[in-house]
Image (tube, helix red, strand yellow):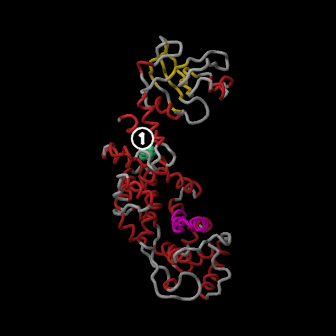
Amino acid sequence: MNEAFLYYIWEHKLFLTSELRTTDGEDISMIDIGRRNRDAGPDFFNAKIKIGSTVWAGNVEMHLKSSDWYRHGHEKDKNYDNVILHVVLLADKQVMRSDGQVVKQCVLPYPKRLEEHYDELMESKLPIRCAEKLGEVPSLFLTSWKDSLLVERLEDKSAYIEQLLQANKRNWEEAFYVTLARNFGFHTNSMAFELTALSLPLSCIGKHRNNLKQVEALLFGQANLLYGEKDEYAQALLKEYEFLASKFDLKPIQEGMWKNHRLRPSNSPYVRIAQFAALLYYSQRLFSKLLECGHVNEMYALFETKPSEYWKTHYSFGEAGDVHTKIVGKSSLRIIIMNTVIPFMFYYGKCHSNEELMDKAVLFFRQLPAEENHIIKQWKQVGLKADNAGDSQALLQLWHHYCEKKNCLKCRIGHKILVVR
Ligand code: SF4
């Protein structure tokens, strides 16, 4: 038993109403349980409770034992002077406010089966603690929970987008460009890619957008991947870059940021930068165009751009190899669409009160195939199959934000299992 469980019983009004009374034997009637406070101060604000014949309005504090009131120093803290009820599991001491007044206390009565179900869940050794009970949860209920989790995941991603917007004077194209660059780094080089984009405003690229070689020069130069290269093409890019860097007063990112080790040639940072340059060259106002797409397949088409001739035979600067057109693969594009395009579309819709766009973002997830990874496999093994990317994103959110953190009390499946069984 822990305090989180106590808050849970209180918040969901799962206590036994008819047995609610103070330690002095006065009857308690709950009018309003109050609002949960997760910051400093009492646990619930603005509760309204009838104790005996008097209605009290104020805060509620909760502890496992009454003596915890003193352990936390509340008897000296004026923030606790407005506590109207101290709710505990064990009343082992009278408690007082800083002005010396006694605080009324109540030992919370609750159904014992609730605690049994909770212990069962918490003590399970399975990676998904509720695995054995999942079959009892109606599929319609699971579908609605997955829908909420998907929106929750999109809301979480919105925080990062908002930060970028604030840093870019709310310029959506610029913020999108930085996020897209980050995504082109595919984990290993995401930081280096993001720093490169942050060091190179989209407006500079915009002025040379009609010349792919200059776009490449700007990107490779800012990425600090041109100095020291003997290759003729790299030297030509360096010459262009030096002219443009002085024109725009650009400084490249720190040396040694890029990782090439253990990457497949098609993921090499050189190939990714060349692909990104081609995308910027061929697609003006890319973000606006993506917002106008009616189906996710139209997005794939917008990303299908070919890097310059040189990259047909190269994975980095130097000796030429076999000819391979290095367009971004479909599975990589899917990751970009899921991690960047759809979250941007959702948040743009939210900021502009455009529910249609927000719904379209969710729908686009449903039009993409489910991701395949060990977490999704784990859900499949316990009977929760992901039919599309909307499902897999929801299950990833459930795993990372609830299961992994033992947040079963905040999970709707957990609630169903605890209360309804
Ligand atoms: S968080 Fe939810 S889904 Fe995960 S183990 Fe707990 S009850 Fe099950």
Quarter of the displayed picture in which ligand 1 can be seen: top left
Q: Secondary structure at mark 1?
A: helix
Where is residue 76 shown, x and y percent of the image?
69, 24
Q: How many marks?
A: 1
- Residue 306 lies in what quarter of the image? bottom left
Residue where numbered disc 1 is placed: 414
Where is residue 100 shown, x and y percent of the image?
67, 16
- Judged by its main secondary structure, the magenta piece is helix
Label 1, ligand 1: CB separation under 8 Å: yes
Q: Nearer the viewer, residue 312 or 89?
A: 89
Look at label 1 and name its amino acid: Gly
Give me the residue at 44% from left, 39% from top.
Answer: 120
Give me the residue at 41% from left, 64% from top.
Answer: 290
Taking 165 as reference, is 3 above or below it?
Answer: above
32 inside magenta stretch:
no
Taking 240 as reference, is 419 above or below it?
Answer: above
Point out the stretch of residues depicted in magenta.
Answer: 178-196
Q: Is residue 2 left or right of residue 144?
A: right
Q: Is residue 146 left or right of residue 33?
A: left
Where is residue 312 shown, x and y percent of the image?
48, 84
Where is residue 257 shown, x and y percent of the image?
64, 69
Of the 4 image quadrants, the one containing the C terminus is top left
Give me the residue at 55% from left, 64% from top.
Answer: 178
Residue count near mark 1 (Cα–Cα under 10 Å), binned few <14, some 14–19, many ≥20: many
Give me the residue at 44% from left, 49% from top.
Answer: 128
Taking 408 as reference, is 226 above or below it?
Answer: below
